[in-house]
Image: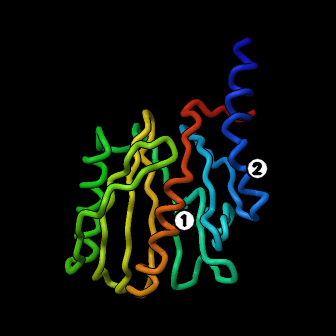
Amino acid sequence: MKKIFPIITILTLLIPLFSFAAEKEYGGIIYGPSFAFIIIAPKGWTLDTETGKRYKLPAVFYPKGSSFDGPLVMYINSVEKKNQKANNVNEFMQEEISRFKLKHPNIKITDGKALPIGNGRLTLVKEFSGDTWSNFEAVAYIEEEKTFTSFTLSSKKQEGYKKNFKAFKDLIAGYTFITDDVREK
């Protein structure tokens, strides 16, 4: 019975993927040492699990017809808590902000509006502008039992950032955590 429950649970979580597939949207299960979650690419965006590997990113997104090297991208990063100094998502977020400020002393950071994820919980959001490359970015932070996960929207132009913020919200809304007990055979 113990083996059947996880299989039924995963299949139940996959049902929304099939309904999105009928609409030509793409999603998948993203996993690493202490995380597995479902993610759905926003309409008009490509989900790419190969390109981000060189940056240690499990999933990257870009508008269809573009690439991850283009002027507008989104990506997800998950890190294990045991490898971080932070004890909670607020501390993790503050550590990231401190690193950004060291690299980009003129960066402007503001609080963004909290955004809902798949199960109704809210993310913490920070908005960044004025870095060395003049990017406009939003980063949403999620805490699970063993990981911190961040979602980033990055645009070289403010217009692209504003125009695609809905896609960023859709990406976050499509996140559904599955487990932190990932075992590869």
Using the image, determine if residue 162 lies above or below residue 111: below
Residue 129 x, y percent position in the rendering: 30, 78
Q: Which image quadrant for residue 183?
A: top right
Residue at 54% over, 40% down: 177
Q: Secondary structure at mark 2?
A: helix
What's the CA distance linking mark 2 and mark 1? 29 Å
In the rendered structure, the answer to whether residue 3 lies left or right of residue 51 reads: right
Residue at 52% over, 61% down: 170
Which labelled disc corresponds to residue 18? 2
Q: Residue furthest top?
A: 1
Please identify the quadrant where the N terminus is shown: top right
Residue at 67% over, 61% down: 49
- Disc 2 residue type? Phe
Q: Which is more foreground, mark 2 or mark 1?
A: 2
Residue 164 x, y percent position in the rendering: 49, 76
- Would you call the spot at circle 2 few (<14 residues within 10 Å), some (14-19), or many (20 or more)? few
Please report contact status of discs 2 and 1: CB closer than 8 Å, yes or no. Answer: no
In the rendered structure, the answer to whether residue 131 lies left or right of residue 162 reads: left
Coloration mode: rainbow
Residue 70 x, y percent position in the rendering: 57, 84
Mark earlier in primary sequence (2, 1): 2
Residue at 75% over, 62% down: 23
In the rendered structure, the answer to whether residue 128 lies left or right of residue 55 reads: left
Q: Nearer the viewer, residue 93 or 164?
A: 164
Residue 87 x, y percent position in the rendering: 29, 38
Please identify the quadrant where the C terminus is shown: top right
- Disc 1 residue type? Tyr
Using the image, determine if residue 31 lies above or below residue 23: above
In the rendered structure, the answer to whether residue 116 lies left or right of residue 12 reads: left
Q: Which residue is mark 1?
A: 55
Q: Secondary structure at mark 1?
A: helix
